[in-house]
Amino acid sequence: MKIIYQSFTSVLIALAALSPIHSHPIVAQTTKPTTQSDNHTVDNLKLIDSYTLPYTSKLDDTKVGGISGISYNPTTKNWLLISDDRSEHNASRFYEAKLNYNQNHFNNIQLKSTHFLKQPNGSNYINKKHFKDNPQLEVADPESIRLDPLYNQIMYTSEGDPGIGLNPFIRIASRNGNFISEIPITSTQKMDKHFNHGFRNNLSLEGSTFSTDGKTIWTAMEAPLIQDGKAPTPLKRGFSRITQYDRQGNLLSEYAYHLDAIPKAPGKGKEAENGVSELLAINNHEFLTLERASVQSSDGSYQNDVRIYKINTEGASDIKDQDTLKHNKFRPVKKELVSNLNKEHIAHIDNLEAISFGKKLPNGHDSIVVAADNNFNKSQISQFIAFEVIPE
């Protein structure tokens, strides 16, 4: 979601950069485990069908849109859909839904329930307008959601906002959205008071996934950190970071991910970008990345170019001790194209930001669903696309 923000005070930003907004211990889990995830193999994807939620969709008096992350629960057969609403339309939230598709068709989506995400103090997240008068509270920009494969809880990420002094965060919550604990992000990802270090605004913690055994947490930065170099252009690629934490919040490893160059130049005076919009574990060293480029034409419209890659961390350099990638030697993760969605028989590719394995199909193959964030914009769509996974 492209929004320009104004800073309030340099003092607030400096304080936020030098110390965590909240410091919470990682709470020991006492709930019973749910179904543990399995390893997968992915060679390529076969398109099944797509479905679009109407722009006017509502549930529990909330506006349904901004779907930026999805996760499938194999026990309940429900899907979790997180909205990146910064509490501007309604309080930050996620939905549970039934995605009804089979091996041939995507029939419909049934929205089932709404869950509001809670701050550590138990209240809903606030929006930027109210933050000015309540800087002790928080604004969330939810981007990714994952069902915990070991416990009856969820993980979600927020992109942060340098304009109001909020760093990105990774949080564990109950199945109804109540705060449980926080995984501290690395110091390399945090902003400093001069804005020459850490995450880029609206280009940070877009992707997350549990490892397939549920023991570790992985995240993906959408774009390069400021100190790692420039964001991709139509002429040049860039490097983002894939990061692994244990459940206690310790940094285990980190890898460089080589982003594609933007596929074409934008219109004069317009914008374009390319980055990782989601991450999904296949096994203990392979992942799928959803890489999305958005290019604005001279008339102001956007074209999205979306690719799904398989990456392999084996043989890549661990960069967790490198504050900057500039002038350093390293090997990025291996990257293999699985699907270029713009070459599929899909009439329109929108702002795809979410990916998750889904149910097993009758032939025993996995399914995958990707979903688009419509930015609460009538010119965009809440698009869901189902694929059959062709295994290796």
Image: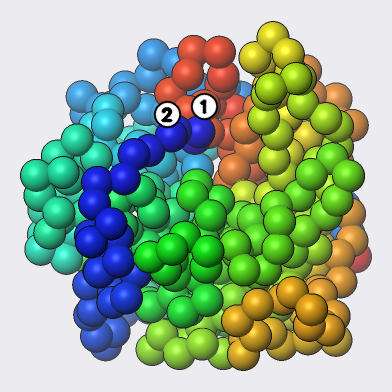
Query: Residue 4: x and y, percent?
Result: 43, 34
Q: Quadrant of residue 321?
A: bottom right
Query: Which element type, helix, strand or loop, lies under badge 1?
Result: loop
Residue 221 visible (yes or no): yes
> Which of the image's four quarters has the C terminus?
bottom right
- Residue at (71% x, 87% y) in the render: 318
Q: In the image shown, does 190 or 61 lie closer to the viewer? A: 190
Question: Colour scheme in the image?
Answer: rainbow
Q: Residues within 10 Å of mark 1 (few under 14, many from 20)?
A: many
> Dot 2: within a 10 Å radius of its alpha carbon, few (fewer than 14), some, or many (20 or more) residues?
many
The residue nearer to you, when weighing 191 against 88, is 191
Residue type at numbered disc 2: Gly
278 displayed left or right of 236: left
Give me the residue at 9% from left, 44% from top.
133
Checking the image for residue 374, the label placed there is 1
Residue drawn at the location 86% of the way across and 32% of the way down: 264
Q: Residue 271: image x %, image y %?
A: 67, 30
Q: Are marks 2 and 1 in contact (CB under 8 Å)?
A: yes
- Location of residue 357 with respect to 334 vertically, above or below: above
Query: Which residue carries the number 2 mark?
Result: 65
Secondary structure under the numbered disc 2 in the rendered image: loop
- Which picture quadrant has residue 12? bottom left
> Image point 69% across, 40% down: which residue?
273
Total of numbered circles in the picture? 2
- Give whichever of discs 2 and 1 has the lower sequence position: 2
Q: Amino acid at mark 1?
A: Asn
